[in-house]
Image (tube, coloured by chain):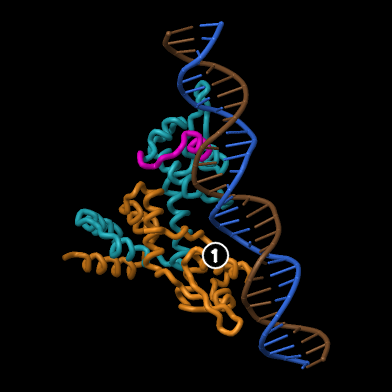
Chain colours: A orange, B cyan, C brown, D blue
Amino acid sequence: MSERPALSKAEMEVARVLWELGAASVRQVHEAMPAERAIDFTTVQTYLRRLEQKGYARAKLDGRVRIYSPKVKPRTVIRETVDDLIERLFAGEAMPLMRHLIEDRGMSDEDLAQLRSLLDGEEE
Amino acid sequence: MSERPALSKAEMEVARVLWELGAASVRQVHEAMPAERAIDFTTVQTYLRRLEQKGYARAKLDGRVRIYSPKVKPRTVIRETVDDLIERLFAGEAMPLMRHLIEDRGMSDEDLAQLRSLLDGEEE
DNA sequence: GTTTTACACGTACATCTGTCCTTGAGTCAA
DNA sequence: TTGACTCAAGGACAGATGTACGTGTAAAAC
């Protein structure tokens, strides 16, 4: 199992963008960050470096520019992160989280419909 | 809005126990922690102190024993925490989290049924 | 060619986190 | 009344986190 260190919140944001881009330079990641998320270029650089240190990304040089790409799949990180959250905040129970999402967090009809078909897909 | 500082992971565990107990001394919280979660009495004490500092709990003295009780409802903390997670890890979209819960995290038939009725409750 | 721009890379640093230790004062039993 | 015990209270401390600055160098613009 030999877990990597968990991602911090800010690192997560950067990781998400990196998954989206597939492979990207610091600049590209910086530019792809949500507009309202004011953050310095070098801060993003630091997060990418830490992502690499923690084993979540790898980098190679393209000329003198560092190109980062994800090394761990979103699925994996999501699993680890959500499991941990459920453990700590919900004593290991997933249902209360579900309930919160459905009840306390208005979902569109579309979302509801989509959910429903997800559920149907689960029946064997 | 004047947000309180977010809870850290370890603080969350203690907060959860405190919600469960309603009001409790350090010792009670310590004893109510999951057995496999080895943690020192004074560590719990520290978390409770921080919970109070951050505005998540209040304490009053019963004799010379401090009795802590929650000041912020689980609902609220859950909302804030989950919102933040969704923002950072899912770019603000709740559906992918749902999908993860349903697809990548085996749910029992019971859970599925329960979910279904939750959904039905949502239709107006 | 010299100025500007763009980056990499290392450094910095205050704060937060996870964890525990120490000290001192009440409490109870011997 | 002397230990043994229980707490509170505060201190400690290494490591993680969020955020950015500074220096140097390659490339682009002038």
* Number of numbered markers: 1
The residue located at (43%, 66%) in the rendering is: B90
Q: Quadrant of the N terminus of chain A?
A: bottom left
The chain that hosts pointer 1 is A
Residue at left 24%, top 65%? A119
> Percent from the top left, x then y, of residue B2?
58, 51
Q: Residue furthest left?
A: A124
Relative depth, front residue between B21 and C29: C29
Residue D11 figure quarter: top right
For disc 1, the marked residue is A50
Q: Position of residue D29 (x, y in %)?
A: 72, 91
Residue A53 visible (yes or no): yes
- Looking at the picture, how far across and down is residue A92, in whole percent? 34, 49
Residue A10 placement, left or right of A93:
right
- Position of residue B5 measured from the top left corner of the image (x, y, whole percent): 56, 50
- What kind of residue is marked 1? Arg
